[in-house]
Image: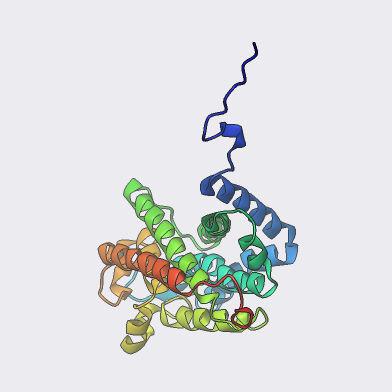
Amino acid sequence: MTTTAVRPRGGTRSDRLPGAWGLGLHRGALEIRQFFRQRDQVVFTFAFPVVFLFLFASIFSDDVRGAGITASQLYVPAMMAAGIMSTSFQSLGISIAIERDEKVLRRLRGIPMPPAAYFLGKIWLVLVTGALETAVLLTVGTTLYDVELPSDPGKWAEFGWIFVLGLTACALLGIAISSVPKSGKSATSVVVLPFLVLQFISGVYISIDTIPDWMLNIGAAFPLKWMCQGLRGVFLPESAKVLEQAGDWEFGRIALVLGAWCVGGLLLCLLTFRWTNRRDG
């Protein structure tokens, strides 16, 4: 008499499809490989903020009165914040719009892959590129412009949560704005314009103490201004806080605003994200 083994109702572990987390890791590895295969994109992504840092630091190299720093040192954390937003908001806003226009999203939606895996893959991409961008700018800042690395572990902890919250908020906003362009061809114009304006009114290209208050108030409604302020608080001496609008680093408010944008960005993604173009239904 022979017996037949009964397979458990849920199947063996090898029979089960990978979950969203596992598939997200695979998607992330694929996104990272595809990114680094495009050499022109890699060079532009990492060189753009470094070139702008060099230009502005060379043009405005005098000491900042009453702050105990040079203008070039003031630009380093601001460019780091802009670099984080560039590798998240701008990168995702443009790339996802192009993938939607080229029907890539429609094809991905038709395979048995949890939607979360696609977004996890994008998050892994911006996490890696954002960390590399920040490391490059920090290396340039410490080597050429005498920016001192913090010796207090608490400062590094503040840098960690500013980086994570800022990157998350900007990535979610990038995913949300990717649904605004009507086509992949118009994505660059639609995404770059607000990012460029925010850089001017958030203290990236212009010192925060010379920007009109009404512009600062508009910039304060978005994450970039608070990322710049937080990174200045991490990498600049306490004497530089006199340049801030409130005369303080305001780390508590920075955490509150960036955290609120993470929640708000997620809601915007849920409400606006589309897998197909509007003309495709």
Q: Please give the name of the residue rendered at 51% of the width and 72% of the height, measured from the top-left corner.
A: 273
Name the side, left or right, on which 97 lies relative to 256. right
Q: Please give the name of the residue rendered at 46% of the width and 80% of the height, measured from the top-left corner.
A: 198
Q: Position of residue 25 (x, y in %)?
A: 57, 48
Name the side, left or right, on which 130 lies relative to 245. right
Q: Position of residue 145 (x, y in %)?
A: 51, 63
Q: Residue furthest top?
A: 1
Q: Position of residue 28 (x, y in %)?
A: 60, 52
Q: Residue furthest front?
A: 1
**In front here: 198 or 179?**
179
Name the image quarter holding the C terminus. bottom right
The image quarter containing residue 181 is bottom right
Total labels: the figure holds 0
Q: Please give the name of the residue rendered at 62% of the width and 20% of the height, measured from the top-left corner.
A: 4
**In front here: 74 or 137?**
137
Q: Position of residue 2 (x, y in %)?
A: 65, 14
* 166 shown above or below 278: above
Could one spot residue 51 in this view of the protein?
no
**In front here: 279 or 222?**
279
Way the structure is coloured: rainbow
Name the image quarter holding the N terminus. top right
Name the side, left or right, on which 156 lies relative to 19. left
* 195 shown above or below 258: below
The image quarter containing residue 249 is bottom left
Could one spot residue 258 in this view of the protein?
yes
